[in-house]
Image: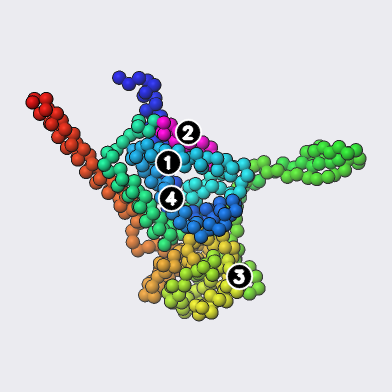
Amino acid sequence: MMKTKDVVLKVLVEFSRLLIGVVFIFSGTVKAIDPMGGAIKIGEYLSAFGLDFLHAFSTLLSINLSAIEFTLGVSVLLGVYRRYASFFTLVFMALMTPLTLYLALFDPVSDCGCFGDAVILTNWETFYKNVVLLAAAILLFIHNQRMLQLYTFKVYWFVALYAYLFCVVFAYWNYNHLPMIDFRPYKLGANIPELMSIPEGAPEDEYNYSFIYEKEGVKQEFSLEDIPTADSSWVFVDAKTTLVKKGYEPPVAAFNLYTSEDDLEVTDRILDDPNGVLLLIAPKLEEADDSRIDEIITIYDYALENKITFYGVTGSSSDVVVDWTNNTGAEYPFLIADAELLKTVIRSNPGLVLLKSGTILGKWHYKDIPEEEEVKEVMEESLSGLTVVKKKEDDPSLVIILTFTLPLLFVWMYDYFRNRRRKKEECAASIEEAHI
């Protein structure tokens, strides 16, 4: 019988295996769903540490980081390459834990982005999470042979390689289309004015105010209630304001659109339009893909014929707008907005967004802009009422899950029966040898 100590250790090891496996798979998956968001976050890291020359590799790093996390999670969860998987997991956590401590102390980026936009953690929450994962990784590395093993060594290579390649392909697909799941506020069906509003009775920010006065060369700090107003010998020096408790913060802090000619704000006009507004959004117009210009012009012509407002929206300068107009023959007017805001609205450069009364009814990556024969059907369907435009194909999530799990299941069945047959042959051989 197993001793109590061995039972406890086995339970801790298996709990650590499940914890790290699930967290790493989840982290890798949400990053793969939105690789452009991961690239933006990596770009923030590179800028914070003075490595701007590596910005060109942000997308490549984002896709590979998601694939590495996903592969480590799958390997740990399924007991594949237990020694190596536990070692590289430990190395990963040994690097990330002090990094997140630095982020928590000095706050060079607002959040680590470890779970993309799916789950936003503060830098301190991320550090505490990593401390727990680091402890679990240490335990797994020391006792890696106690981890559950679902496959034999013969097929380890397939499981690990398939997990990595699957995640790379999945991330690349999301990069070339809009993310399969939109974790940001500007998802289909969202109403932008409502996202910016603060509910009545919502908690407000709470501050602590203190004042510094000086008397006879000595400085002293007073609270608001203790200010020495009765003693004129105290001279005011400075005031301090400290945030004690954060109040309600709306999902969207600001959504401002300006005309490119005279910087006139037209946000309300766009968000209040009941007839529909099409926005061709290009955060950086100088980097925008122009391969679907004909389809864009077709939609613009349709918008003109049906009195639907159409604007290009960019964070680039007016000179870049002029170059784009000259190169593409664009006749639609442009609005100016913050580039970071536009990257949040849609992960495409350019991308098409359909609004009605401030509600997002449709979003298209430039590679998925409807063809000419589809434009009328799509527009009439979406503008007939506040109906969100949906893709004609079914939700691909189930197909993607089955695409990943079924091959692993078939390999497990093959591995199981092959290993079982081998053991029977070895047992038979042993019995025959004993008889001889």
Quadrant for the N terminus, please: top left
CB atoms at circles 4 and 1 under 8 Å apart? no
Marks 4 and 2 sit apart, C-alpha to C-alpha, by 22 Å
Mark 4–mark 1 distance (CA, rounded to whole Å):
15 Å
The crowding category of the residue bearing disc 3, from other C-alpha atoms within 10 Å (few below 14, some 14 to 19, many at least 20), is few
Q: CA distance from mark 1 to mark 2?
A: 14 Å
Q: Residue at horizontal 34%, vertical 38%?
A: 79
- The amino acid type, in three-letter code, at marker 2 is Ala
Residue 155 rendering spot, x and y as whole percentages: 27, 43
Q: Which residue is mark 3?
A: 317
- Mark 3 secondary-structure assignment: loop
Q: Residue 135 bears which disc, if any?
A: 2
Q: Residue, x 83% and y 45% (percent of image)?
A: 237
Numbered label attached to residue 66: 4
For label 4, the SS is helix
Q: Residue at x 26, y 42 (%)?
A: 154
Q: Secondary structure at mark 2?
A: helix
Does 138 lie within the magenta span? yes
The one nearer the camera, 176 or 84, is 84
Most foreground residue, 278 or 43: 43
Residue range corresponding to the magenta coloring: 124-142
Q: Earlier in the sequence, mark 3 or mark 4?
A: 4
